[in-house]
Structure formats: structure tokens, C-alpha cells
Image (cartoon, rainbow, N blue to C red):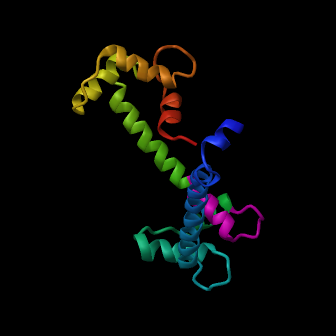
Amino acid sequence: MAFFLHSKTRKEAAAPLDSLASEKISDHREFEKVFGQFDVDGDGKISPAELRLVMMRTIGEELNLEEAEAVVRAADKDGDGLLDLEEFVGLVGVEEKEEKERELREAFGMYEMEGEGCITARSLKRMLSRLGESRELEECQAMICRFDLNGDGVLSFDEFKVMMMPS
């Protein structure tokens, strides 16, 4: 640790953390803006009726009252039948995570060409070739090895997800 602090200035060492903090603040501001669009009456809460109205107006998705109430209930942590900003962020975050998971499964399927439910060095080599990246089989094995958490020589979907979504 001492070596790290001496080898870089404090400013350089803090830069990644500052960037991460700025990104989180920016994301939070975006959530606040979107929340404000859903909070039609400006009371700091989103009701099922407001959710229905904005969904129809902005994306053309029609929710009946029962569906809107179910969505609110699913994210309503304090049981008041309304969504505050924190609950709204949780709801939207879950949807974004599910969308990313779907996209990752689709990408995984492109690399997993042998029907084995995993990415092998051979299937990785084949896909990279299709993408114009010629690699030797040994290079593909080394690439897989970096993220092969259980040491079985292939990438499962969970290992692929770790590789694609760094924390």
C-alpha cells in the first residue's frame, strides 16, 4: 500500500474513485429527472394512476389499474401504496439489470456454439474469427482461463457474466 501511495500522487490514485462518484451522482440526477416526470402532481410520490398515465403518454404502454398497482406493490418498501424516489430507483434498477441479463444471454449464445451450455476455446476461436479477430486455440484457452472461476477449462454463463459486467 505504501508503495502505491508513493508511486502515484494522491490525485492520480483518487481519480478512478472520483470518476465513479461522479458517475453515480450523474445517474442519480437522471433518476430524479425521470422520477419527476412520473410524479405528475409533484408530491414526491408516484401513485399507480400516475404510473399508468406516464407509461401511456411516454412509451405508449397501456397498463390497467391492477397491473399498475402490482408494479407499485412490488417496489413499495414502506407499504404506503406509492413509490418514493428510492423505491422508484430500485424498480428501474431491477428492470435495467434484467435487460442487461437478457442481452448477456444473447451474447453468450453467440459464443456458445457447440450446444454444451458453455464457451469452449474452440467456440471462442470460431466466434472471434467471424468477428475478424484471428486467434490461436492456445490464446483462446488463455483468455478463458482468466475468467474460468471453477477451473473446468470453459466459461459458464455465470463466469461470462462476471467477465462482461465488472463490479
Image quadrant assignment for residue 139: top left
- Residue 76 location, x and y as percent? 70, 63
Give the quadrant of the N terminus.
top right
Name above or below for residue 22 compared with residue 38: above
Q: Nearer the viewer, residue 84 or 121?
A: 121
- Residue 37 location, x and y as percent? 53, 78
Image quadrant assignment for residue 40: bottom right
Name above or below for residue 101 compared with residue 66: above
Q: Range of the magenta residues? A: 76-94
Name above or below for residue 142 compared with residue 27: above
Q: Could one spot residue 59 in this view of the protein? A: yes
- Any magenta on residue 82? yes
Query: Which residue reaches farthest bottom?
Result: 41
- Any magenta on residue 72? no
Is 74 left, or right, of 136 in this rendering?
right
Q: Residue at x 30, y 21 (%)?
A: 125
Is 56 left, or right, of 69 in this rendering?
left
Q: Residue at x 57, y 54 (%)?
A: 15
